[in-house]
Amino acid sequence: MEIIATGEQATGMMNTIETAVRSGFFADSWTVGLIILCFFWLIALIWVVKDVNARSENIAFQILAIVLVVVLTPVFGLPLYVALRPRGWKWDKTVWRNIVELQGTVCETCGSIQSIEHRCCSKCGDTLQHPCRECGEFYAQAYEYCPFCGAPNIDQ
Ligand SMILES: [Zn+2]
Ligand SMILES: [Zn+2]
């Protein structure tokens, strides 16, 4: 009796599956899966474009990053990109380049970029230079020696 019941149950299940297949349920599941996959692919692509743009100035590397994710799929492309990408942000490099080019210095109090000529910070007013004890010329506090007479900076 039990065996018959189980057999009927199995037949019922098979019928349900058959109905599901005929009604296109599985075809729809594949479509949904494909849409989700494309969605994550798109998100990965947007993330890589933004990330590489913030990290690299090299156009060839930017194209390579996009190709990695598009061709190798995010599954392989993303980890490869993360391994290859530059460590720092482009913004930091630009700031440091500006500091060097402008002969600037960074205010130790507020962190703003200041010209090496400034005696006081233009943003917070803190002292950036002090007079040499030997010759009286002003120079940056970070200097170890006076750039005018060579006397050691004992106020450092
Ligand atoms: Zn300051
Ligand atoms: Zn001096």
Image (cartoon, helix red, strand yellow):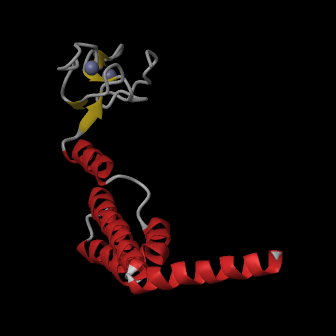
Judge from the rendering whether residue 129 lies leftward or rightward of residue 34; answer left or right.
left
Q: Quadrant for ligand 2? A: top left
**Residue sitting nearer the eye, 109 or 22:** 22
For image coordinates 30% across by 46% down, the residue present is: 96
Q: Residue 67, position in %: x, y?
A: 32, 80
For image coordinates 28% across by 33% down, the residue present is: 105
Judge from the rendering whether residue 121 lies leftward or rightward of residue 87; answer left or right.
left
Q: Is residue 23 above or below residue 96?
A: below
Judge from the rendering whether residue 118 lies leftward or rightward of residue 40; answer left or right.
left
The quadrant holding residue 34 is bottom left
**Residue sitting nearer the eye, 42 or 81:** 42
For image coordinates 49% across by 77% down, the residue present is: 76
The quadrant holding residue 68 is bottom left
The quadrant holding residue 8 is bottom right
Q: Residue 135, position in %: x, y?
A: 29, 17
Q: Residue 149, position in %: x, y?
A: 32, 27
